[in-house]
Amino acid sequence: MAKYRMVNVKFWDDTYIGNLDTTSKLLFLYFFTNPLTTISGIYEIQLKRIALDTGLDKETVEKVLVRFEKDGKMTFRDGWIYIKNFIKNQMVNASVLQGVEREIQLIPNDVIKLLQVDWIQLVDSVGTACGQGGGKLKLILKPKLNLNLNLTTTICSEQKIDFDFKKWKFQNITDGFIFLMQEKFPAVNIKSELAKMEAWFISNPKNKKSNYERFITNWLIKAQDKSMPKGGNNGTDRKYSKTTDSSGSSKYDGIGAVAET
């Protein structure tokens, strides 16, 4: 499945970013968007890889990392990085928070100690990203290293999806929901399919649903299946392979067609 990271367009309006030099801006953005990032903002990455991806020498990378740590933005130790406001800059919902929990449980305890992860700050970051909602996030209630902390944070409790048969529009579909569906169904255009569903209800006004989220999911499953290339065996033998186009650029057939961003 393709992996996506959200970068707010206001990134370039941030005072801290505006005061960085060109090299530091590149690295700051890189640490939020490189392929090794995890939704927790804590991940393993080597200086050699950073230098190779950015075209910078390792000494320059190390110098900038020292500044970022001094400024309270991130910590780098022995090939691991902890970005303190990573979650705050992502589209957060209950599924994403479950991913945060899984990722944190995979991080070695000695790395948590080494990076000096601020659990209270992490909770605040999640709460800021979610905004108002119901329910409690349990991952910080069970912090690693047996820390005696009783921390909770509000998760994004999205309202139930409904359909307005007067305006012929879905209600309570958030950007977070669209983002999640796009990750689950990368071969289709989610917004386009939602428009088709709304048009379908115009033609079928009596077909009200008790669960519109399930209706949307089932529709997208069918749309994804239709978009897949068909092989032999009456179209049931789907194969996805890496190919090269006439320009020499690599691309993926089938489910891999959506690039990582």
Image: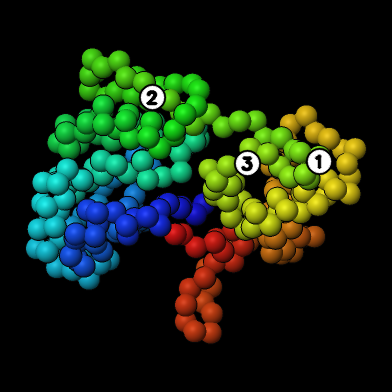
Give me the disc on residue 153. 2
Residue 83 location, quadrant: top left
CA separation in Å, label 1 and label 2:
37 Å
Amino acid residing under circle 3: Ile
Q: 228 or 151, which lies in front? A: 151
Left or right side of 62 for 172: right
* Quarter containing the C terminus: bottom left
Residue 146 on image: x %, y %: 24, 18
Picture residue at 44% right of the left edge, 21% below the top: 136
Residue 237 on image: x %, y %: 70, 58
**144 vs 28: above or below:** above
Residue identifier under label 1: 166
Amino acid residing under circle 1: Lys
* Viewer can see residue 207: yes
Picture residue at 76% right of the left edge, 38% below the top: 164
The first of marks 1 and 2 along the sequence is 2
Residue identifier under label 3: 173
**116 vs 247: above or below:** above
The first of marks 3 and 1 along the sequence is 1
Give me the disc on residue 242. none
**37 vs 58: above or below:** above
Camera-near label (3 vs 1) is: 1
Amino acid residing under circle 2: Thr
Residue 196 location, quadrant: bottom right
Picture residue at 49% right of the left edge, 36% below the top: 93
Quick check: marks 3 and 2 in contact, CB under 8 Å? no
Residue 170 on image: x %, y %: 71, 42
Q: 199 or 15, which lies in front? A: 15
Camera-near label (1 vs 2) is: 1
